[in-house]
């Protein structure tokens, strides 16, 4: 039985600017199963957020332009949904947590009104019932004195509390899928841990799927069942968390893993490794592999043709010429994750 809640097929999306066309998303295909957490991982500017904002229809047109592809949500093709159609989905069927709650919460509205607003719009309940549910949800996300917090403004709460309010706002209508765009970036380490535990707990309680957008592999290790690694508007590797952390096959994934700090570093006397160079210019993407200019294993073919996705094992796949049977054998690097970084 098909368990896919969300499926994106061959998505191409660009921004039309005065300087030309920015090809932000180039042929992205992915899916999210019911009740699972999928992580989208990659450097800033690789297309993670743009891909998900396409699903939510949050990018104005112009400058954004959907060139081709399809988006299937809960069995329905929502690729060309208009604003009114999306209003019925956003908040009720799908929701999004942004990385900086201070800029996302209306500073002129009290916390209670922010949470109740969505319930009154999407569900046939009274204001009194909405208030009771809002207080209950604030309690679930760990807000102390939730009844009093209903009358507070966002600036009266700490960063961690504001993020909890964001989670409460987005889960009051029990959406089928929750998009979390760098939900812990602006928080201290202790609060990050608390927010991740909270998201995992509520996901299980409410049978909600989560798409986690991040470049923090430590967060990914704790949250995700599957991972999609993005680079320059493309997905270069996909697999389960174990496959990506313990058996990565793409040089870009190797670079990300090699730069992970942690107690299990192989040689603590060395500095953390970095990926040399910069991502390609998406005004004029390279005709070959986008990672070729930064790759230590680059071959002639890498600069001339884009590699096809190769299936490695089950759902594990990667797009790299090193996986071609004609490619030379190489000594793959050993990663921190392979010596216990997930323990």
Image (cartoon, rainbow, N blue to C red):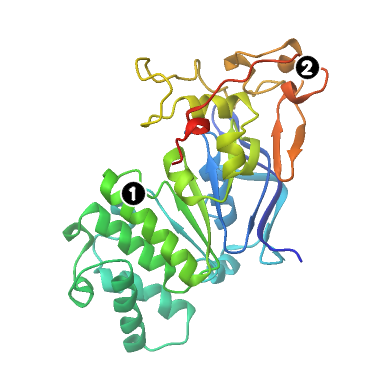
Q: Nearer the viewer, residue 204 or 274?
A: 204
| Residue placed most toward the observer, 107 or 165 | 165
Place of residue 147 in the rendered image (x, y in percent of width and height, measured from the top left): 21, 77
Q: Give me the residue at 62% from left, 33% from top.
A: 247
Q: Is there any visible trace of residue 176 in the rendered image?
A: yes
Determine whether the residue tagged by mark 1 lies in a helix, strand or loop: loop
Between 99 and 13, the one nearer to me in the picture = 99
Q: Quadrant of residue 153?
A: bottom left
Residue at point 20%, 71% (across, down): 149
Helix, strand or loop under label 2: loop
**Would residue 60 be visible to someone looking at this image?**
no
Q: Nearer the viewer, mark 2 or mark 1?
A: 2
Q: Which mark is residue 131?
A: none
Q: Write down the residue under mark 1.
A: 100
Q: Give residue 327's mark.
A: 2
The CA distance from mark 2 to mark 1 is: 44 Å
- Name the quarter where the N terminus is drawn: bottom right
Residue 329 picture location, percent across and down: 73, 15
Instruction: Tell me if residue 136 comes above or below residue 200 in the rendering.
Output: below
Question: Which residue shows up at 45% across the image and 35% down it?
Answer: 341
182 over 273 or under it: above or below? below
Query: For mark 1, does the 10 Å Cα neighbourhood hold few (<14), some (14 to 19), or many (20 or more) residues?
Result: some
Mark 2 touching mark 1, by CB under 8 A? no
């Amino acid at each position: 039985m098909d368990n896919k809640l969300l499926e994106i097929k061959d998505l191409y999306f660009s921004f039309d600017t005065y300087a030309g066309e920015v090809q932000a998303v180039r042929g992205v295909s992915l899916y999210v199963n019911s009740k699972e957490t999928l992580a989208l991982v990659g450097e800033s500017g690789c297309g993670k957020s743009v891909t998900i904002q396409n699903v939510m229809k949050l990018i104005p047109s112009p400058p954004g332009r959907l060139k081709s592809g399809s988006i299937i949500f809960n069995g329905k093709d929502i690729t060309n949904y208009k604003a009114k159609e999306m209003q019925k989905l956003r908040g009720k069927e799908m929701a999004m947590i942004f990385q900086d709650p201070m800029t996302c919460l209306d500073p002129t509205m009290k916390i209670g009104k922010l949470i109740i607003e969505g319930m009154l719009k999407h569900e046939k309940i009274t204001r009194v019932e909405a208030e009771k549910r809002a207080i209950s949800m604030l309690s679930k996300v760990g807000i102390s004195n939730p009844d009093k917090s209903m009358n507070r403004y966002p600036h009266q709460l700490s960063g961690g509390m504001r993020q909890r309010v964001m989670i409460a706002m987005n889960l009051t209508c029990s959406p089928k899928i929750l998009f979390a765009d760098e939900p812990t970036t602006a928080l201290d380490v202790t609060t990050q841990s608390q927010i991740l535990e909270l998201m995992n707990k509520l996901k299980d309680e409410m049978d909600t799927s989560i798409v986690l957008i991040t470049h923090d592999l430590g967060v990914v290790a704790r949250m995700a069942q599957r991972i999609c690694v993005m680079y320059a508007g493309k997905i270069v590797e996909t697999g389960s968390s174990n496959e990506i952390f313990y058996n990565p096959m793409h040089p870009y994934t190797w670079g990300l893993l090699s730069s992970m700090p942690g107690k299990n570093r192989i040689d603590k006397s060395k500095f953390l490794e970095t990926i040399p160079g910069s991502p390609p210019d998406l005004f004029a993407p390279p005709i070959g592999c986008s990672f070729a200019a930064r790759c230590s294993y680059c071959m002639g073919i890498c600069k001339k043709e884009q590699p096809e996705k190769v299936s490695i094992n089950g759902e594990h796949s990667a797009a790299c010429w090193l996986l071609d049977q004609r490619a030379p054998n190489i000594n793959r690097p050993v990663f921190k994750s392979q010596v216990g970084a997930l323990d």
